[in-house]
Image (spheres, coloured by chain):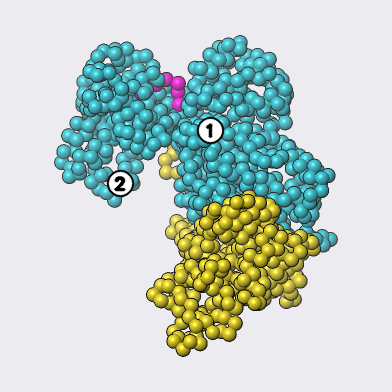
Chain colours: A yellow, B cyan
Amino acid sequence: MSTTTIPPQPLTAKDFATDQEVRWCPGCGDYSILKQVQTIMPGLGIPRENIVIVSGIGCSSRFPYYMNTYGMHSIHGRATAIASGLKATRPELSVWIVTGDGDGLSIGGNHTIHLLRRNFDVNLMLFNNQIYGLTKGQYSPTSEENKVTKSTPFGSIDHPFNPMALAMGADATFLARSMDRDPKHLQEMLKRSHAHKGASFLEIYQNCNIFNDGAFEVFTEKASKPEEAIFVEHGQPLIFGAQKNKGVRLDGHRPVVVDLNEGQFSASDLWIHDEQDFGKAQILTRMFDDPRIAGHLPRPFGVFYQIFRPTYEEIMSAQLQEATAKRGPGNLDKLLAGNETWTIS
Amino acid sequence: MSNKTIQQIEDVVIKFAGDSGDGMQLTGTQFSNNTALIGNDLSTFPDFPAEIRAPQGTLPGVSGFQLHFSSNRIFTPGDACDVLVAMNAAALKANLKGLKKGGIIIANTDGFDSKNLRLANYPEGVNPLEDGSLVNYQLHTMDVTKMTREALKESTLGMKEKDRAKNMFVLGFLYWLYDRDMTSTLNFLTEKFGKKPEILDSNLKSLQAGYNFADTVEAFSTRFRVEKARMEPGTYRSITGNTALSYGLIAASQKADLPIFLGTYPITPASDILHELSRYKNFGIRTFQAEDEIAGITSAIGASYGGHMGVTTTSGPGMALKGEAMGLAVMLEIPLLIIDIQRGGPSTGLPTKTEQSDLLQAYYGRNGECPMPIVSASTPSDCFDGIYEAFRIAVNHMTPVIFLSDGYIANGAEPWRFPKSDDLKPITVKFKKGLEEGEDQFLPYQRDENLVRPWAVPGTPGLEHRIGGLEKQNITGNVSYDPENHQMMVKIRQEKVDRIAEHIPLQKIEVGPEKGKVLVLGWGSTYGAIKSAVLELVAEGHEVAHAHIRHLRPFPKNLAEILHSYEQVLIPEINNGQLIKIIRDQFLIPAQGYNKIMGVPITKGELVARIKEML
């Protein structure tokens, strides 16, 4: 059933668009994410027919209708489980999961963590807008405490999830964070997600301009972005600030912001990002301060962590092959007869 | 050697009863397999507590295994027992009412000490083995524990491990009593304990000691022999429902050349299907123990979407959890098998007891207008044919199919004249391979004469398309909120399921005249009891017939005609009346019910009495 057909002409982003009218609210961050996905797809060199996009329910989950590939817009929270069954049976397909903070962390939270620990080779894009958009504005599991929404007129009393820490806890083999407003970075992260063999968890900060406008603006707007967002790169020191004058240093296990102009510390004293360092990745996921609080740490973006572990579908296929090699291909008549029979004439 | 006589008998019902830890299920299974091999017809009914180890010696902790074997054709594990093996006082107390007057009791006296008597709630100072209360039975007492220990006195095993071989002593005893060759159990033990020679040795010695004891002791002067049953010629094996079901899936997968993906979550009494299928990876079977019931079915949907046969197995509570995903499968119109091994409900209910109480859930238990075919099995071996049929319908009609079995037939065993793979009906799978000539665009909801849409799987160039749970526009499959389209699509999905009636066998009458006074209409595991009862009444000259429905949705085309050929219709069910509601609704007949909701099967005797009320 597998196919390796190479299309005669190189594909373009347009080849990945469908004839369906895109129906997100004008100004929604989802438009940018869709565009970046359509942009990187041709460069992956995968025939369209071998790409499947599976989504759950929510605004972001409309995504498959706009991608000219195979796609399934499924039910709330279950895209991850559907993708698991698909990838287990069809390892050669490139499977992308589109989910949101409600879909993937609330109703589907269970499937998300199990997908990650099993390490299916799929790309999970979690569109985090910290709000329920499709149901018109209730707080989500990533909404900040005290958030006033339609369902929390006195402020939310829920403590929010830290999605990266959750994924880390589920032993994800690839963790990255990006944002809708930084197309270049998002494209890079999408390519890295695809290139990773194993479950890729990509959290994308996405603005819901109707129900939660500006939730991430400190990280995305020109004025504050350099001071609030820190873009981590493998082998590079953690430097941020409009003047590239700030760095993050590790004081034991505690990240500390230092001023590089003061003369006490130079770039070589800083935390050098290592994507394979489990301990440091954990600290990175915990750099999750509320940006409204004085003395907070900047929020990291980029690939936090990547390791390699055999994928679920590889091990599953290997077990099947091993069993066949050991016992020979199944013999139905032998199976039906079993070990003990008797004959009546 | 002893000068004991052998008496021919036709029919025996034995109940093995003891504490959960006494190994009664194993003893029963071993005796059943041995019985099968000598060619008797047989039917078994394992009955055990939900607790893994209920408090030792208590009534809730009693585990039983009933075996009916005969030189005639039989269809049930029997109403009342001829022989009761009671390993302790609780086992006797719990099962005495099911023993025929004059029946044999084989009691392990060690299980009747003051502690065991107290745990079984006998009044202080009362021991039924000694107070004459069992005078109407043939009571044989023996200290199984003491004799097992004596037989193993040279073993270096600890006392606890020695005592574990008690069940083998009893089994050996019964093998002597029914004049059996013990080879099948010797082979079984050698395979099971081959790597633990001491344990193997203790089991073998204990088994032989039980046999020798029976041969020596004066109390038993007669052995019994049951001749081969007069069954259809052919080669047989013994099989339980869940194993037959697993084999049916494998067989259908092989014949259809369509690999199986089982996405499931463990639940009693369905887990054995997962255990069984997970052993057959060399048949290309993928089993996936999901994180919950919902992931079980949705992963199976993912597999079906990818062009495999997605299967999920469950029982009542899990079925409830899968409801939304079943609706998705109905919208997607892809093949899928949802296997529900029913148990007592609601909620957690009676996990290890049987009930037919998910029929209405299977029919109506989803949001929206959500019709799905429903297929059921009536006996352990029938699970093979039933699931094979469900598989065929799912693939040929691009639809999820619900398969209903229950705890009684799932765990029960009977002889099975297994088929040859060449004799199994072929199953044809059609994948759409690409755009055909003149086709410039793929239309995923374009239908054939059976209203079946094409199966176009990812990886097929030119057929890229999107599907999902939102209402589909007719033919294109695009999202549509159009009112007329929705009405039409609801009707089309219903009509598609209804048309399956053109592709299933007509309903037949199992026993009895084609018209007459009473039709007993059943489905599922009540088959044996109804058939036995109706056979008896027909033999007495009554105008009673039995029809048993495999295809519950859609019904066979001729069902209305059959229902109207009898003055009265009786529908026995192990629930509070479910099929009867559907039959009354669809056929407007005043059917009557016989409903037993006690977690145990309906017996032949009670059914005969109920039918007689109508004659």
Question: What number of labels is visible?
Answer: 2
3D distance between C-alphas at marks 1 and 2: 40 Å
Identify the subunit bearing mark 2.
B
In this rendering, does residue B233 appear at all? Answer: no
State the image quarter where residue B86 is shown.
top left
Say few, some or many: other residues with alpha carbon within 10 Å of mark 2 (under 14 / 14 to 19 / 20 or more). some
Residue B517 as seen in the image, left or right of residue A144: right
Q: Earlier in the sequence, mark 1 or mark 2?
A: 2
Above or below for B450 versus B596: below
Question: Label for residue B193?
Answer: 2
Residue that badge 1 annotates: B346
Give yes or no for residue B342 being in the magenta stretch.
no
Q: Residue furthest toward the left?
A: B154
Indicate yes or no whether the magenta region holds residue B77: yes
Name the amino acid, label 2.
Phe
Q: Residue at x 60, y 78 (%)?
A: A226
From the image, which quarter does the N terminus of chain A lie in?
Answer: bottom right
Residue A51 locus on image (x, y percent): 66, 65
For numbered disc 1, what is the local secondary structure?
loop
Identified by mark 1, the residue type is Pro
On the question of residue A18 being in view, the answer is yes
| Magenta extent | B76-85
Query: B476 or B432: which is nearer to us?
Result: B476
Task: Work out whether A294 lies above or below A241.
Answer: above
